[in-house]
Amino acid sequence: MLFDSVVIGCDHGGLALKEALVAYCRELGVDVTDCGTFTPDSVDYPVYADKVCRLVLAKPNAAGILCCGTGIGMSMAANKFIGIRAAVVSDPFSAEMTRRHNNANVLCLGGRVISAEQALTFAELFLNTPFDGGRHQRRVDMISEIEKEQRVTS
Ligand code: RB5
């Protein structure tokens, strides 16, 4: 795996995927932090996006995985963090390309969109695909510039 650790979180809509992903990462011997939620009770997805993204930014070379009903709310919340590049994925091509072209560091998955089996496939692709760099580095740097500009003007 390209990352030193994986931080995972979910709301009730993503609980089944999160449980499958945590078990899968532990079986592989990956250093995984499970930020919850741990029960099917209804919870607010931004709370878990916040927990996971803070840890992804604090740990060296960490990836995040966030699961909710669609993956969309999690990605919206995660992308508010400077330095987080979160992508909702529901097909294997996007799982690979968001690493190769966007250097994504957080994978967002929808428990009401994909199966647990698909989640494992997409996570495996995401965690093992390197960033292509080159012209894509320039474009990712442009995203960082937008973040910097927003920080000083807001
Ligand atoms: C919760 O019902 C649902 O809104 C949430 O899991 C997620 O899909 C939001 O984007």
Image (spheres, grey):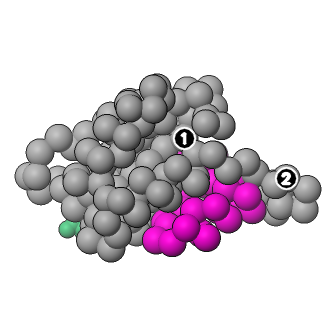
SS of the residue at dot 1?
strand
Q: How many marks?
A: 2
24 horizontally vs 60: left or right: left
Q: Is residue 106 visible?
A: no
Question: Is 96 in the magenta?
Answer: yes
Q: Residue 36: name its quadrant.
A: top left
User: Residue 34, which numbered label?
Assistant: none
Query: Which residue position holds label 1?
Result: 63
Across and down, in percent, residue 3 comes to: 61, 35
Question: Is 42 in the magenta?
Answer: no
Q: Residue 25: name its quadrant.
A: top left
31 horizontally vs 127: left or right: left
Residue at (11% x, 45% y) in the render: 39
Q: Is residue 121 visible?
A: yes
Q: Nearer the viewer, residue 62 or 128?
A: 128
Location of ligand 1 given as a quarter of the image: bottom left
Query: Which residue position holds label 2?
Result: 133
Across and down, in percent, residue 38 comes to: 17, 41
Q: Nearer the viewer, residue 141 or 116?
A: 116
Q: Nearer the viewer, residue 145 or 28?
A: 28
